[in-house]
Amino acid sequence: MSKFIVGVDVGGTSVKIGTFDLNGKIIEKWEIPTVGKTVLPDVAASIKAHFNEEHPEADCTGIGIDVPGPVKDGGIVLECVNLGWAMTDVKGKMEELTGIKTLVVNDANAAALGEAWQGGGMDSDSMVMITLGTGVGGGVIVDGKVVEGATGAGGEIGHILVEPAETVNCNCGKKGCLEQYASATGIVRLAKKGLATGKYTSLLSDIDDFSAKDVLDAAKKSDPLGEWVLDRAGYYLAIACSHIAQTIDPAVFVIGGGVSKAGPVLLTAITKYYDSFVMNSLRGKEFRLASLGNDAGIYGAAALWVRK
Amino acid sequence: MSKFIVGVDVGGTSVKIGTFDLNGKIIEKWEIPTVGKTVLPDVAASIKAHFNEEHPEADCTGIGIDVPGPVKDGGIVLECVNLGWAMTDVKGKMEELTGIKTLVVNDANAAALGEAWQGGGMDSDSMVMITLGTGVGGGVIVDGKVVEGATGAGGEIGHILVEPAETVNCNCGKKGCLEQYASATGIVRLAKKGLATGKYTSLLSDIDDFSAKDVLDAAKKSDPLGEWVLDRAGYYLAIACSHIAQTIDPAVFVIGGGVSKAGPVLLTAITKYYDSFVMNSLRGKEFRLASLGNDAGIYGAAALWVRK
C-alpha cells in the first residue's frame, strides 16, 4: 500500500481521470462523459468507485482537477463557457462531495505542469509550454509553479502581438496575434492567403477543404506553399518565444497540441529564427516536443500535489 | 532592541548601505566609495563600524547585497564588468568577513524588489519594474520573488524586440530592442533622427548637445519634436509591456530610472497604446512611477530577508 494521487481533466465532451504514484507513474486511467450540470458529482462518484483494496481512499493524498476556464483564489472557477458554468467553487464542491482535499488549475496550465513533471519539460523547474491547437494556449512555469497572473491571464501566449502590420482581426478582437499564424486555424488561413497570391504552386490547390495537417504534410514533401507557411509559423513562434525568453528566461520551451504532431520540422522552423531575436545569453535555448499527448492534463492536475 | 536588516547596493562609484527594521522602515543610510579590489572588506568593515548599542550585531537578521552583474546559485557573481570582478563568491566572502548570513541579488532585480517592498509596487506580490536609464533594465517579480531565469537573464526587458524594421544595431548586437527607443540614449537618438528628417520644428534645434531630459522637457512644452519622441517611446514601451503582460500578467508595472523623472506624461504615453496590444482581461493594467529613487537598491537588497 502506498500513497497515490487522482488527476482529473475536465474537457468539453469527456472527463479523463487518472491515478498516479507520487513519482509520476500512472496507475490507472479512464474516462467518463461530460454532463455540464452533474460533472462534479459524476467525477466524485467515479473516483470513489475506483478506490480498491490496493489503492484505498485512505491512501489518497489528494485530488487535482483541471477545468477549461480561469481559476482564482485556489479553486474558484470564474466561468467555463464550454461547460455552461457560471462562477463555481470547484475546490469546495469536490471536497464536499468526496471528503478528499482538492486542488484546481486551468487546463492550459495543467498541460504545462504535466509536461514539466513527466513530459517534454521533465527535469526542469522553469519551462514554457505552447499548445498549438485550434487556438494557441500556453502555460508558464517558474520554480516549478504555474504563473497564474494577477487576473488569471498568465501564459496567454496565443495573443502576444507578433505582426503589427496585420489587417485581419483575431478572435480576441486584436490584430496580429500569434494564434493567427501558428494555430491549426492560422496555418490553414496562411495557406489560403498564400494560395490566393498565385505565387506558389502547391499540392494543396487540388484539395477543396485542406487542414493544417495537409499543409504541414505538404511542407515535408517540399511543397513551396507548405514550406512558406511552415516558415512563417516558425518565424512568428520565434518572435513570441523571444519575448517570453527576454522576460522570464525559461530553461526550455515545450511545443504541444495537434499542430506539434508535425514533429521536429516545426522545432527547426522556430530555431531558424529564434537566436536572432534574443540577446546573447538567451541563445541556444532548448525547444522540445510535448510527449504526453492528451494525458498532459491528468498528469498536470495530479502534479499539483507534488509540486506545491 | 529589535531585529534589523542591512541592505547594500554596490555601484560603480559608491556603495550605498542602509539598515532597516523588518517592516521596511529605514533606520540609517550611508555611503562609502567603491574600490574594486577591496569593496567587500570595505563594506564588511563599514557595516561592523555601524553596529551600536541600539542596533547590535546580535540583532542583525542578515545582510542583503546587490551587485551590477548576473548572480547564480544563491550568491556567486559571474562577472561585474564595472567593478573589474571575475567570478566571485560574494555570499561566501561576505559571510566569512562579517560572520553574518548574506543573500546576494543582481542590481536591476534589487531595484524591482525594493519598489515591490516599499515603493511604487507596494502592496503587490506580482510586478514588473522597468528602469529607464542609460540603458533599459528590468526586474520581474512573481509571488514576491525575483524571476532570475535559467541563465540569469530574467527581466532583460531592454532587449525585447519591439521594431523588426530597425536598421541600426543595439549595443547587444541585435536590432530593434526597446532600449533603442526608451532609454535616455534612445530618446536622444530618436530626437536626432526626428530632427534630421526636417519634419519637426523644435526648441531642441538650438541646443548643441541635448539630453533626454531636454527632449522630455520640450515635450511637456508641446514642442512637436519632443512630443513625437515621447509618443514613440510610449508606443514601444507599450509593445514591450503587452508582451510581458501576455506572458505573466503582473498586477502592476513600475517605471523608474532617470527618464521616469519626466513624470506622469510618460505613463500617459504608455497607456495611450497599451490596451490596444493586449487581450481584454489584461486591459486597464496599472502603471506607476517608481518612488524610491536611488535608494531602491538598498531596500531591495534588505527585502531579500523578508520576502524569501
Image (cartoon, coloured by chain):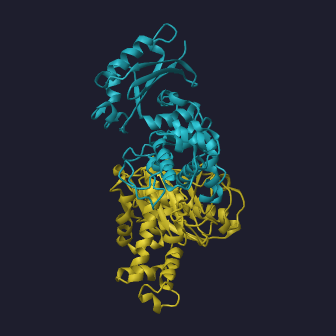
Chain colours: A cyan, B yellow
Q: Look at the picture and state if B228 lies above or below A11.
A: below
Q: Residue at x 60, y 36 (%)?
A: A120
Choose top left, top right, bottom left or bottom right for residue B21. bottom left
Choose top left, top right, bottom left or bottom right for residue A221. top right
Direction top: furthest residue: A53
Residue A89, percent from left and from top: 31, 31
Q: Look at the picture and state if B136 lies above or below A70.
A: below
Relative to B71, B163 lies left or right: left
The answer to whether any part of residue B24 appears in the image is: no
Residue A43, percent from left and from top: 37, 20
Q: Look at the picture and state if A254 lies above or below A283.
A: above
Q: Residue at x 57, y 59 (%)?
A: B66
Direction front: furthest residue: A206
Residue A185, percent from left and from top: 45, 43
Direction bottom: furthest residue: B206
Q: Residue at x 45, y 80 (%)?
A: B213
> How many numbered circles does the render carry?
0
Relative to B277, B109 lies left or right: right
Residue B56, percent from left and from top: 52, 55
Q: Residue at x 61, y 44 (%)?
A: A219
The answer to whether any part of residue A21 appears in the image is: yes
Q: Report the front residue among B16 and B192.
A: B192
Relative to B277, A306 lies left or right: right
